Amino acid sequence: MAAARHWEQDRDSTVYIGNLDERVTDALVFELLLQSGRIANVHLPKDRVTQTHQGYGFVEFTSEEDADYSARVMNGVRLFGKPIRVNKASADKTKAVEVGAELFIGNLDPLVDERMLFETFGRFGTLVAQPKIARDEANLSKGYGFVSYADFDASDDAIANMNGQYLMNKEINVQYAYKKDGKGERHGDEAERLLAAQARRHGVQPTPATIPVGIGGPLFPNQPAVPPPPSLQGGSGPPPPTGMPPGFQGFGVRK
């Protein structure tokens, strides 16, 4: 791997990767994201004392196109049981908006996965994040999950049509999720709806989510392989990267 360069030198070709398990290494990040494009550099900021990473990092690709592609297909992929966050480092944060149209879906059958939630609840409107299913350390469903919409019309419609319906032979309950800041309040109140309406009038729109995908390999069982990145589509494409990060040993098997 090339000598470390500050990621801001080419932030258009760089993605932020977060929610990393403590066992994740530079080498593992390199191998994972290499499936979505050619990589120029991997940087996981380390604690000065412990020399362990701080749960996030940056991956610079050789092209902006591959960075965009990686952010689309790798966001939400599970690594050591944790869904990682992959976003463009150059994303305009002023355009980000959390509407608050987030729903809790309870009493889920163990066979219901994120893709099924996407296909089921995506019928009612635009989802702004990939559906999340709470899972234990063995990656087994805890029986509930969450979906987030771009507007309250869609979330209201989903509640009206899906609450009490059967999904994989179990009657699910659908309601607004509790806010993360505590106090026992749920999303969907008048204040959130007013803020969402104001944001829309100013042209601030959430980014639609992509269909959840996974990658093959021992850390990601029973998930389809990611299609080839843009740099490798349409012909033979450029040669693969020649360098591997120091200490590269490949994926470890999850226990």
Image (cartoon, helix red, strand yellow):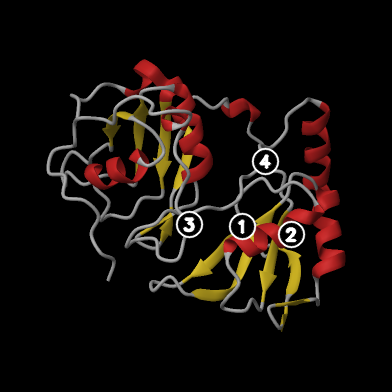
Q: Mark 2 = which residue?
A: 121
Q: Position of residue 227 (x, y in %)?
A: 48, 44
Q: Which mark is residue 208?
A: 4
Q: Earlier in the sequence, mark 1 or mark 2?
A: 2
Instruction: Please say if the residues under marks 3 and 1 sit with CB atoms less than 8 Å apart.
Output: no
Q: Secondary structure at mark 1?
A: loop
244 with respect to 171 (left or right)? left
Residue 226, position as x, y percentages in the image: 46, 47
Compare residues 181 and 143 and report the one nearer the observer.
143
- Residues at circles 2 and 4 in contact by the CB criterion of under 8 Å: no
Name the one closer to the observer, 98 or 173.
173
Q: Locate the N terminus by quadrant.
A: top left
Mark 3 vs mark 1, foreground winner is: 3
Element marked by disc 2: helix
**Which quarter of the picture shows residue 92?**
top right
The residue singled out by tag 3 in the image is 224
Residue 99: x and y in percent read 72, 44
Contact (Cβ within 8 Å) of mark 3 with mark 2: no
- First along the sequence among labels 3 and 4: 4
For this orientation, the residue located farthest to the front is 235
> On the picture, is 143 further left or further right than 74?
right
The amino acid beneath tag 3 is: Pro
Look at the numbered discs 1 and 2 and tell me whether their residues touch, using CB distance below 8 Å: yes
